[in-house]
Image: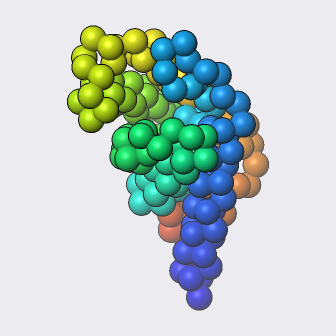
Amino acid sequence: MKNNLYRLRKITMTAVMIAIICVLTIAVRIPSPTKGYMNLGDSAVLFGGWLLGPIYGTIAGGIGSALADLFAGYPVYIPGTLIIKAIMAFILSLGSYFFVGSKKKHPRIRFIVSAVIAEVFMVAGYYLYEAIAIGEGFVTAFSGVVGNTMQGIVGVAGSYFLIELLSRTDVFRLYGANGFTNKGKKNFPKI
């Protein structure tokens, strides 16, 4: 019974994170002078990866971001966004587990390193997607690197702020720290 309640919470929170990621991606859109738009969705993708773990976080990050591209009128980006954002959340969730969820020192620095690695993957992923899959070529696709880098910086800062803010509440006690359960422990590690 307890496992079913935990699983129901994870599924429900995954659906909520899909909606939050989609809304944050669409609600605050700053059109890029080159192509696409910058948004706040990366903050929610990284936060979702940290909170929900590698399975549910990956699902929320990929689907929420892909739905945002669908609703915003960028259908050409849907396949790339689905894969890139899902892998971003996966990278962050594994980094959180190995760095933040362990007893190692300096969890804040390790979270930031994991988030930066995920964002570097995002910038490189969109560069390659635009150059190869969309067919813009490597020179033309390079024009999106600056906008994606700025979006990545905002994503790291925003997700770190959310985790710091929510670590002072009981939200992580409901879902487990970093998306993983710590059976037998009353206090989950906080970032």
Classify the position of the C terminus by image quarter.
top right
Estimate the x, y position of residue 159 in percent, counting from the top left.
60, 34
Q: Residue furthest right?
A: 169
**Foreground residue, 140 or 182?**
140
Estimate the x, y position of residue 128 in percent, counting from the top left.
27, 28
Q: Is residue 92 above or below residue 146?
A: below
Residue lying at 50% horizontally and 54% vertically, measured from the top left = 63
**Foreground residue, 104 or 156?**
156
Residue lying at 30% horizontally and 22% vertically, measured from the top left = 136
Q: Is residue 85 visible?
A: no
Residue lying at 51% horizontally and 38% vertically, measured from the top left = 74
Q: Is residue 66 visible?
A: yes
**Foreground residue, 68 or 19?**
68
Q: Is residue 35 above or below residue 23?
A: above
Residue 146 found in image quarter: top left
Instruction: Describe residue 65's horizontal placement relative to residue 144 as left or right.
Output: right
> What scheme was used to colour the molecule?
rainbow
